[in-house]
Image: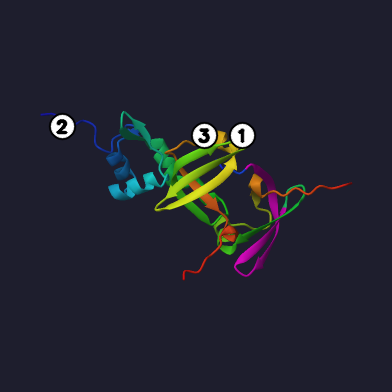
Amino acid sequence: MARNPQPSSGTSDVLTTREAARYLRLTLPTFYRYMWEGKIQASKIGGRYRFKRSVLDRWLGKKSDAEEVSGRNKLVGKVSTIKRDVIMAQVNLDVGDNKITAVITRDALDELGLRVGDMAVALIKATEVMVIKAQ
Amino acid sequence: MKLSARNHVVGKVREITPHGVMVQVKIDCGFPLVASVTRGAQEELRLEPGSPIVAVIKAGAVHLVPRSF
């Protein structure tokens, strides 16, 4: 009986989740974590994730774009709600158990094409963070 | 990289002065601009005099002062 002619890390440019994780030599849980953190770009086709090899190659060479800014605090989260006004918009992110609110211009929102459910990075300059001592 | 901040100012680092955990970065971008970043950020971005940079300022952080001249 003929075996599957395509090896699991085959030459095709489109990979399944398992193949993509193996290609990057990551365990599946780590790979999923990077996905949820928005570090790895995934496309969903018919409820299944597929990965382009060229995109993974670029990720290997460059890691995340967000590492190229001076801001120290980069919180990766999922957009939970968006409130739009004419000039400004309020974007709420779920970062783990914490909720982060960003107020950005409406122009910025439209330019980023942000939607509820998207992954996004909240960037906060270290000098803007206040500290409250726990009682 | 797609950033929500509205103001992106292209320039070059002119001078870096360490101040404890922070460094003051003077920027040449057609007008004087000063940034204060942590030492960690400076090392990670390998900022030194002459480095090409983009200064990013959130629109909501810009103050306007009326002037009469």
Q: Are marks 3 and 2 in contact (CB under 8 Å)?
A: no
x and y, in percent, of residue B16 in the image: 68, 61
Q: Is residue A121 left or right of residue A30?
A: right
Q: Residue B48, image x and y in percent?
A: 65, 58
Q: Amino acid at mark 1?
A: Val
- Classify 10 Å Cα crowding around label 1: few (below 14), some (14-19), many (20 and above): few
Which residue carries the number 1 mark? A86
Pick the front one: A105 or B2: A105
Q: Say what secondary structure mark 3 lies in.
A: loop
- Residue furthest front in the image: A135
Q: Which residues are magenta?
A: B6-27
User: Is residue A27 in view?
Assistant: no
Neighbour class for label 3 at 10 Å: few (<14), some, many (≥20)? few
Label 2 crowd bin: few (<14), some (14–19), many (20+), radius 10 Å: few
Residue at (51%, 34%) from the top-left corner?
A113
Q: Which residue is mark 3?
A: A113
Residue at 28 percent of width and 38 percent of height: A9
